[in-house]
Image (tube, rainbow, N blue to C red):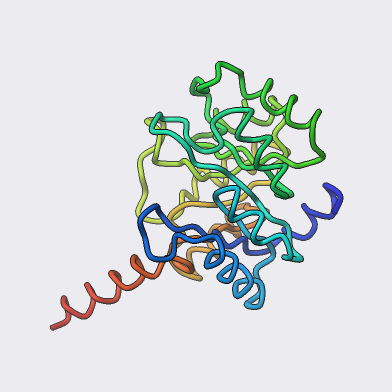
Amino acid sequence: MTATDILEALAGGLIVSCQAYPGEPMRDPRTMAQIARAAVIGGAAGIRLQGIADIREAADLDVPVVGLWKDGDADVFITPTLGHALAVAEAGADVVALDGTRRPRPDGRTLAETIAALKDAHDVLVMADCGSLDDAIAAEAAGADILGTTLSGYTPERPKSAGPDLELIGQIAARCSRPVVAEGRIHSPADAAAARAAGAHAVCVGTAITHPSTITTWFADAVRAAG
């Protein structure tokens, strides 16, 4: 798919993030790929996957794959270096998601340098996971193709809201020309619709669809509270 094809495929659609944390029963590439295939059957316009093995396992998907590699315990851990970004692209991701904040990157490269080197090596789009409007403006200037609200509430610039950061979605959509992907704390269809209405090009949902431990906790807590 060309860059235009990818953006058109995602436009107005749902991206499902299929991830499991280390040590969890579902932390297996084959399991994540199966969940991804089920999400596509349900209408997902795109899939977001973490880890090289997971991306490779889902190579047969016929929707755009947003790939990332979480590594390290520093503030910047979402595809933190150029080496990580190159590996994600080589694994088959159509879009490489990386930390799009203005914080220093572990390898010393700027975001612009990372994006330029990645695009020199691979024909991929870049999604910048941002935490603020200033992040998004800087990421767009650095060459990012997609601006995500993934890190809203996880950096000091914005409070962590109970639901999606609708204000930030609207701010980025109004100030930037690149498409916005709303991501983070979207827990219901109503949240997803509100994020889209706020100006998102596409909406990414993870936990509420693909993380059974958390979903079970929501229901178990509600049942106990009602009793």
For the residue pair 191 and 51, the one nearer the viewer reads as 51
Q: Is residue 103 left or right of residue 116?
A: left
Which residue sits at x=39%, y=41%? Answer: 153
The percent coordinates of residue 39 (x first, y second) are 60, 72
The quadrant in which residue 12 appears is bottom right
Which residue sits at x=71%, y=60%? Answer: 59
Q: Is residue 211 left or right of residue 144?
A: left
Could you tell me how many numbered marks the image carries? 0
Which residue sits at x=86%, y=49%? Answer: 2
The quadrant in which residue 226 appears is bottom left
For the residue pair 114 and 33, the one nearer the viewer reads as 33
The quarter of the image holding the C terminus is bottom left
Residue 129 drawn above or below residue 193:
above
For the residue pair 24 and 221, the one nearer the viewer reads as 24
The percent coordinates of residue 125 (x first, y second) are 74, 42
Which residue sits at x=50%, y=22%? Answer: 106
Residue 60 drawn above or below residue 22:
below
The percent coordinates of residue 191 (x first, y second) are 48, 64
The quadrant in which residue 16 appears is bottom right
The quarter of the image holding the N terminus is bottom right
- For this orientation, the residue located farthest to the top is 108
For the residue pair 222 and 133, the one nearer the viewer reads as 222
Q: Is residue 40 left or right of residue 75?
A: right
The percent coordinates of residue 54 (x first, y second) are 59, 56
- For this orientation, the residue located farthest to the bottom is 227
